[in-house]
Amino acid sequence: MRRTDRVRLRALAVASAAAVVGALIALPAGTAHAVSPDIVISQVYGGGGNSGAPFTNDFIELYNRGTTPVTVTGWTVQYASAAGSSWSRTTLSGTIAPGKYHLVQEAAGAGAGAALPTPDTTGTIAMGANAGKVALVTNSTALTCSTGCATQPGVKDLVGYGTTASSAEGSPTGNLANTTAALRAGGGATDTDSNAADFAVTAPTPRNSSSTGGGTGGTRIHDIQGAARTSPLAGQAVGAVPGVVTAVGPSGYWFQDPQPDADPATSEAVYVYTAGAPGVAVGDSVKVGGTVSEFRPGGTGGTTNLTITELTAPTTSVLAHNAALPAATVAGAGGRVPPASVISSVTTGDVETAGGFQPATDGLDFWESLEGMRVQLNGAAVVGPRSSFGEIPVVPQGSATRTNRGGILVQASDGNPERVLLDDVLAPTPTANVGDTLSGATVGVLDYSFGNFKLLVTATPTVVSGGLAAETTAAQAAGELATATFNVENLAPGDPQSKFDGLAAAVVGNLRSPDLIALEEIQDNSGATDNGVVAADQTVAKLVAAISAAARPTPPARSTR
């Protein structure tokens, strides 16, 4: 089936659709009872040093579920007993990076236990082992509330732990013990403003700024993509992967990390397959969990297709709306310049498993390193006409060996690795022809299917005509025999008469009625159906009739009185 990339059809459909949690930011910044877009309390433990306790100290753990660093200098974590209104404070300092934790060590009990990981902040608060209240406050003013604490000025997040807690977001967590803590789900990323729903009572797992959340909380998109043609995490589950939605399709969406690493070989974006309407919008700041998969367009037997790295069976948490999109990477002059001649230096074996990932020298690896990302072409040169599938082959300005008609020349030493197809999956592509130019910036997300990297444009480009006109050959002179080869583009008897008439006009007008024509791509009498029929007399007869009609002189006009 052609164009499976439009609806992302699969041989084995992923049965689980995305579970999308929307976040509505309605109250003023720094006020709880609105899902926090960044810093939250991710773990609370008050049994430190008590009988049977695994750790010597109480602790409060924070997590940045957002996509940008947050400075917490001058903020405080505060504690009050389950029913109390007297709050103790520990002042914070420093910055918490996206996907990272901040461990606040509090008072030690009298018993034994292991030391905590190196704390990021140290305080002296003695917390209740079974129940209490913990608040994250964006200032140093002590709270005085017993109830309704979540809506007090400056309260960023609040956790009521234990069933007797007098204040909580929604309902408090279950009762804790010397051996259990309250842990926020999703590695700290889940926030629905319900302590009971968001936290599990389980063994304490203190994490500091060097921790990565057991391999999930700190995973970034570039970790998933890797500097390779397939993901180093293929088949593994990941969680709380941050990014911003850059494009939305009918069966999934693309999201990109606004905090890229320093390695241009690792893509910063990935496709999320939701198997239906994604339920997110462009500009949503999200955290995504799912299984890292490699999808081969055209099915697993598509040996001529590479795979696309994506997340399947996803869960999506929307942290905020209308976030700034990551800047598009310019391909070409002024940005990352594609290799000039080599498509792939892998000449034997399987290109997907061969080593030597070389984006700087191999065109295949260059475009792979941008998979899923926002890519920008400035003044793209059109090197082929728009196809019936809405695809336009283009190259960045200054690329390739060009023909005098504006196309590109394939040579033994130059496979034109700069070439990429524009596609109309997300926005319409314009009518364009060889030699045209697309003015300004053409922006889209980079995808792959049917043996080609494709830039799925997110806005329709503007075409500047190159003035290309159809060629007309010189007519044969007396005594000359004219021959021609003519591609009739899979002509079949069932094609509309307009196609036959157009081909006939080209034979008579542009080819000047040659004496002999060798036809290419002419179908038999049953067209594309493979039923044993090989005779093409009906197709030829219909074309001959159209040529004869086009060659007849137009009768002179007559006037009547």
Image (tube, rainbow, N blue to C red):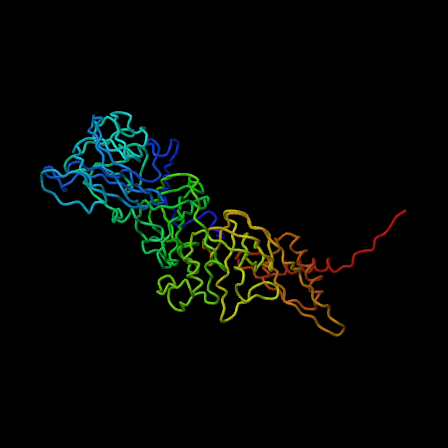
* Front residue of this view, candidates 482 and 294: 294
In the rendered view, does 296 fall on the left or right side of 499? left
Residue 351 falls in image quadrant: bottom left
Q: Residue at x 13, y 41 (%)?
A: 56
Q: Residue at x 70, y 60 (%)?
A: 547
In the rendered view, does 432 fall on the left or right side of 288? right
Q: Residue furthest right?
A: 561
Q: Position of residue 436 (x, y in %)?
A: 60, 57
Q: Residue furthest bottom?
A: 479
Q: Position of residue 279 (x, y in %)?
A: 42, 39
Q: Position of residue 463 (x, y in %)?
A: 60, 53
Q: Is residue 79 above or below residue 210?
A: above
* Front residue of this view, candidates 235 and 135: 135
Q: Is residue 325 above or below residue 45?
A: below
In the rendered view, does 339 fall on the left or right side of 99? right
Q: Position of residue 472 (x, y in %)?
A: 69, 64
Disc tally is: 0
Residue 281 falls in image quadrant: top left
* Front residue of this view, candidates 465 and 470: 465
